Image (cartoon, rainbow, N blue to C red):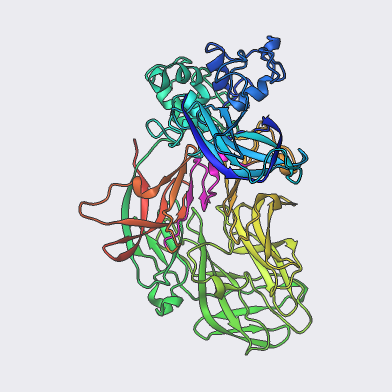
Amino acid sequence: MNFSSKKILQRVSISGFLFSCVLPSAGMVDRNNNTLSDAWELKYNNLVLFSDANATHSPTADPDQDGWTNAQECLAGTNPFSASGVTGKTAVKITPALQQNSFELAWPVIVGKVYRVQTSSDMKFWANVGPLMAAGTNDQQLCMGIQTTNTATDSAAPRLFWRVKVLDQDTDEDGLSNADELILRLDPNQSRSFLDIPDQNLAEYHTTELVQNGISGILLDIDPDNDGSLNLQELKDNTDPKNPDTDGDTLLDSQDAVPTDAEINWLKTPALTYTWQAHVTEISPLHKPIAINQDGQILFRDGRLTGMQINDQKNLWDSASQTWVTLELSGQQNINIGTNEWEMSWSYNGKTVNVAANQTQFDLIEPVIEFIDINDNGVIFGLSKGDNYGRIDPFIPGMVWKRSGTSKTQYAPPNYFFPQYPFPAGEISSVVHNNYYQNALEPRKTFGGIANDGTINALCSHAPVGFNIWMNYASSGNTYSMTTVRDLEQEIDENMTFPGAILDQNRSLCVERRALNAGGYQSKIWLKEGTAISELSFMTNQVVEVAEMSEAINKKQDDTSRLWITSGDACLLEKRIGGTGTARWHKPASMKMGAHRLNAQGLAITEGDPDAQIPKNPTLWRNGKYIDLNTLITKPAGSNLQIIRAIDLSTNGLILVVATENGVTKTGILTPVAP
């Protein structure tokens, strides 16, 4: 008989020895939901799974009458139908050794299991003795030698109980125990034993074939459920080869975008490749792209920060004409604000703003401090800046540019608009977003945006008083009417609010970051739907500043659109049946990395982080999988092109990216190639 042994020095008097079946499982396949391993059942029951109709197959039954239940035998890896032999009831033998004052413990083993010798003086608290012990391929028993410093009759020696505890192990961390992998003829040291397919997928639906013949027993080129997916594809998708609709969402597995997620019940997005076209070579590290629309127009956040003159006009790039679009920076607008009806007269050339109500003069310091967003109609949202000689905070009006005719490259002068809020007497401060300098260098639409219907999602802040007002501005021609969404009433020094994405006049997001008494911060995400405001604090435990939203492809059962929301590494998809609170939302398991942008084609992108300690490439989420964008393009011959950031995703699938090539940073567009 083969065996392995260990020797341990103890001062003991032997009182008794047990074999323990307190056995945590590392993982198993249990398709018949009886808490027993399917692989173990098939091994000892002639390739047939246990049946609820057979009383001897119950986890609590003991068909071989050896004192161990099926559950205990399963965890120990022993034969439930035989009380003898190596695979029968495991017994421990205590054998006096030839050396004086020593003895040896020995027990039969199952390859793949690991064993722990323990000792106790009261059988309540057990202490480990020696290391974990695992059986080698040819081992049939393990031994441990115990050497004492007294005789077994020494009355001064403590009297101890001993036991062997059996444990499962999952060396490759694939969710299957080593013992089960050996029964299934898989490699317990490799999580993917065949064609880069997870062992868990192989075991889930082909347990019988694996136990009987290993991987060679799986017929890969057949389609037993006639769903259009061969067994090989079903293995890759982890779908049931004997069920044409694994997740029960009425779509065949071969047509389903994510056939294991019933809430993602839209058709597969075509597996398109992309063409790369560079459009703008980096002017300065601060010249950052922030948005793209369906016409391929790219908006850059801030030319001012590059050291360029304002009239350099390098903020809107038109990819169709390969030119910079001129955005006029002057304009006039008389605005009535609140009940005081203050008349504001703007003049870019004179750089003054007169407020008639209280005779306060503002200097227009910078006509444009940054651009925020562009929609599919080419409407651009940006911010200006004024001051009144430092007596109060900067005065930040919003600016909107619209196309002047049918040409997509001709724009009218900007229209200015102001928050309408009852500020304290004697003070006027209108800020449509807060803390812009802190985030001005980031290539993200951190502060709201503009919907395709022209509605703007923004914020009104007043630092001295300490308030943040989340607002929407609805567009009617060149006039903007303000709606207060939520008065957040928070001190800006401690808490911050960031307007998020906006779909239309009725639906927008806001992120509220609050300081905690115990230190650190917590983020809450607010969703506006019409006049209703709901909190999505259960969405993420991260400290985030950005929240994005899109409509999903498939609608709810009442034929209304479904929302798709992402922030940080969390994604929420509105369930088809609706619901309220947390029951309304589904967290797709396939989107654990979250997303930076979403669109109504069922696509999402992650941004990537080239500056991380371990750089992260940007990815495309499509049909339940994240795909490195660099693998979806054909690089020019001899090029070392590397996409390092994904910035935006248009409604028609254009991806705005930043790449490096031969040491040069470029902004470009990935365009899907028609199949």
Instruction: Give how far across and how far down residue 533 sits, in percent.
Output: 74, 52
Residue at the left extreme of this rendering: 638
Query: Where is residue 14, by image quadrant?
Result: top right
Percent across and percent down for residue 364 are 56, 83
Q: Main secondary structure of the magenta part?
A: loop
- Tell me if residue 180 comes above or below residue 280 in the rendering: above
- Image quarter hosting the C terminus: top left
Examine the image and state in which quarter residue 522 appears: bottom right
- Residue 143 drawn above or below residue 54: below
**x%, y% of residue 465?**
75, 78
| Residue 255 is at least partly visible in this image | no
In-image side of 531 versus 367 (left or right): right
Which residue range is magenta in the image? 587-610
Q: Nearer the viewer, residue 531 or 71?
A: 71
Left or right of 217, for residue 500? right
Q: At x 74% / y 44%, what residue is drawn? A: 158
Q: Is residue 670 above or below residue 67?
A: below
